[in-house]
Amino acid sequence: MPGSARAMTVCTVCGLVAASAYTVVFGGDGRLWFAWVVLALVTVGVVGARRV
């Protein structure tokens, strides 16, 4: 996995941890989870494009 795809994956995982922690402490926020899903989909696209 090239450096940019790896960095994007790390950011996505860190974002998941941060979103989960925020939800536990402050309660759910739909916009936060929507943003994380968009980030995850972009990451999947980047990783998929790099594998082709």
Image (cartoon, helix red, strand yellow):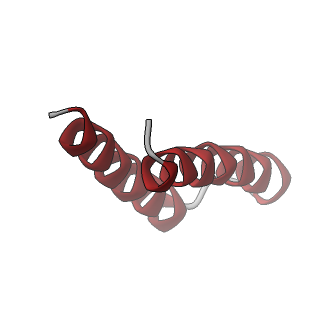
Please tell me which residue lies in front, 28 or 20: 20
Q: Residue at x 79, y 45 (%)?
A: 24
Please tell me which residue lies in front, 46 or 31: 46
Residue furthest to the left = 52
Residue 39 screen position, x and y as percent: 41, 57
Q: Residue at x 60, y 54 (%)?
A: 11
Residue furthest to the front = 2
Locate residue 43 relative to residue 21 in the image: left or right.
left
Residue 45 screen position, x and y as percent: 24, 46
Vertical arrangement, residue 45 with respect to residue 33, above or below: above
Please tell me which residue lies in front, 22 or 42: 42
Count of numbered marks: 0
Locate residue 42 relative to residue 17 in the image: left or right.
left
Q: Residue at x 71, y 51 (%)?
A: 23
Looking at the figure, which quarter contains the C terminus?
A: top left
Residue 46 screen position, x and y as percent: 29, 49
Please tell me which residue lies in front, 18 or 23: 18
Q: Residue at x 34, y 57 (%)?
A: 38
Looking at the figure, which quarter contains the N terminus?
A: top left
Residue 41 screen position, x and y as percent: 30, 47
Residue furthest to the right = 25
